[in-house]
Image: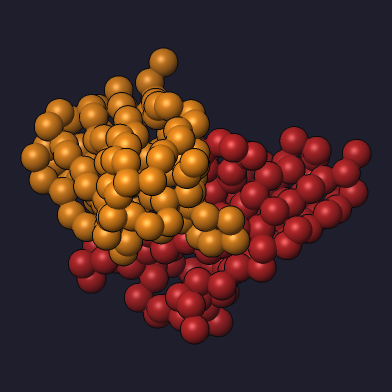
Chain colours: A orange, B red
Amino acid sequence: DGGITQSPKYLFRKEGQNVTLSCEQNLNHDAMYWYRQDPGQGLRLIYYSQIVNDFQKGDIAEGYSVSREKKESFPLTVTSAQKNPTAFYLCASSWGLDPQETQYFGPGTRLLVL
Amino acid sequence: QKEVEQDPGPLSVPEGAIVSLNCTYSNSAFQYFMWYRQYSRKGPELLMYTYSSGNKEDGRFTAQVDKSSKYISLFIRDSQPSDSATYLCAMSGDSGAGSYQLTFGKGTKLSVIP
C-alpha cells in the first residue's frame, strides 16, 4: 500500500532534550511538509522541502530542524529551543509545490512534554 | 484579522440532516480552495477541491466558492454518523503569485447523532 508513515505515534520529551519525529513516504512524491496542529488552531507550516537536499522554513520554524537526505524521508527534530513543543505533528507529501497538487497526510505524532 | 476564519463549533446534528460548514477569508489572492476531513487522532484527508469560484459536487458533498464575498461553504446532504469528524478548510494562492503554502482554518467539529 502506498502512503505516509509517521513514528512514533506518541513521543515524550524531557526538558532540554532534542527529539526526532520520523516521516516516510512511498508515493514517490517530490515535496514533503511538516505541520503543527494545536487545539483550537489551524495547521501551521513548520518546514517544507521540494527536492532532496533542499528545504525551506515555514511560518513557525523556530526551535525545529529538518533534513532531506532521501526522497522518501523527511525527519523533523524538535530542539530544546522550542519552548512549547506539546502538539500534534503532521507530515504531508505531494507531487510538487503547486497548489493544485493534493497534499496527502500521515497519521501524525503526538508530542508531550514530561 | 486572521487570513482564514472558521467557526470551531462544535456542531451537532441529527442523522439525515443537511450540514453547512463555512469559512471566510481576507486574502484576495487565494485561488485554490480545499476541504479536508480529519477523524479524531488521525491525519486530514482531502475531501473536496475547487479552483476559483463556483460549485463542485461529489456524492453527498457540495463545495461552493464565492470569491466576491470571500466565502466558501461545504454542504453535506443526508448526513451520517460516519461524517462525524473535524472539517478543515484550506486555501492557497496561484503558483504564479509565489505563494505555495496552504492556509488552514481552525476546523469545525461535527457530530452526527443517530
- Do we see residue B17 in this rendering? yes
Residue A82: where, in percent of width, then height? 33, 55
Residue A91: where, in percent of width, then height? 37, 40
On the rendered structure, is B76 left or right of A44? right
On the rendered structure, is B39 left or right of A6? right
Q: Is residue B4 above or below residue A51?
A: below
Q: Is residue A13 above or below residue A36?
A: above
Image point 80% across, 38% down: which residue?
Answer: B81
Nearer to me, B71 or A67: A67
Nearer to me, B33 or B87: B87
- Do we see residue B66 in this rendering? no
Q: Quadrant of the N terminus of chain A?
A: top left
* Image quarter of residue A57: bottom left
Q: Is residue B49 above or below residue A59?
A: above
On the rendered structure, is A64 left or right of B71? left
Image point 56% across, 36% down: which residue?
Answer: B42
Kindly give the residue lying farthest to the front in the view shown: A15
Image point 48% across, 29% down: which residue?
Answer: A9
Residue B16: where, in percent of width, then height? 87, 45
Residue A112: where, in percent of width, then height? 49, 42
The total of numbered circles placed on residues is: 0
On the rendered structure, is A94 left or right of B76? left
Kindly give the residue lying farthest to the top in the view shown: A1
Image point 50% across, 71% down: which residue?
Answer: B4
